[in-house]
Image: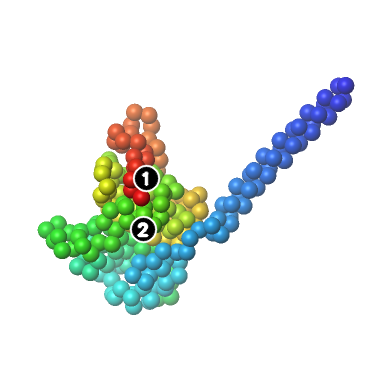
Amino acid sequence: MVAWIRSFRFRRALIVGLLAGLGLFFLWFFEVFSFLWVAPPPSWNGVVPGRTRLREAIGILGPPSRSDCRGSAQVYVYCQPERWGWREVELWVAGDRDDSIVFGVLRSGPGVPNHPEYDALVDVPTLQVLVQPYGRPDQVMWGKHVETRYLIWARKGVAALAGTYDGFDVPVASVLIFPPRGVRGFLLAATFWPWPKDVATWSYVKPPAPGDAPDTLPQDPYDWATLR
């Protein structure tokens, strides 16, 4: 009898271990091969992150206003709101050769004060413009400032910084497009991405300590049914 009980416990432990191992395997498999479930890369004015080379992008957009070296990336900045409505458009490139690949396009600062004619040029004036084609984001994270949130559609290759205001017209401050990837892969690579562009890490977008919330709203304050 004792031997049977021990045998039963061993078999049960073995089964539990196998199931746990299978679970970990499937999580690993899904993350490693998540590219099979991601969308085609997004594009902006013919520039496709992960595919378009620097010389091709400049051929499409024209010469940039300036270029900056930020860490391991070379950033080509367009300050031409009269063309697109955005105060800055940045091409993030892995290297400075003309055949280097553009791996991110960041649009920041929609509209220009005292120039309402530029507002009509902005292609993503509100959060609804992103939610309608992409749906609910994979992640909603605390923004750097009160009443802002980072929204990440990792498998669509899109991220945005938006306000948390009530109503239908939720303003967007910045939009980043990049080669689509799994959510975990995007978050692990965040320190190498131009989002947000002014810090080296994403530490401040983690949930704050109790009693230290950035504002009085939930981390995800949006009514997704209304936004769609």
The residue at the far top in this view is 1
Q: Secondary structure at mark 2?
A: strand
How many other residues sit within 10 Å of disc 1, few (<14), some (14-19) or many (≥20)? Answer: few
Q: Which mark is residue 25?
A: none
Residue highlighted by disc 1: 225
Splitting the image into 4 quarters, where does residue 225 fall? top left
Q: Residue at x 42, y 46 (%)?
A: 139
Q: Secondary structure at mark 1?
A: helix
Residue highlighted by disc 2: 176
Identity, as a three-letter code, of the amino acid under mark 2: Leu
Q: Residue at x 36, y 54 (%)?
A: 132
Q: CA distance from mark 1 to mark 2?
A: 24 Å
Q: Residue at x 76, y 32 (%)?
A: 12
Left or right placement of residue 72 versus residue 123 in this view: right
Is the Cβ of the residue at disc 1 closer than 8 Å to that at disc 2? no
Q: Residue at x 11, y 58 (%)?
A: 114
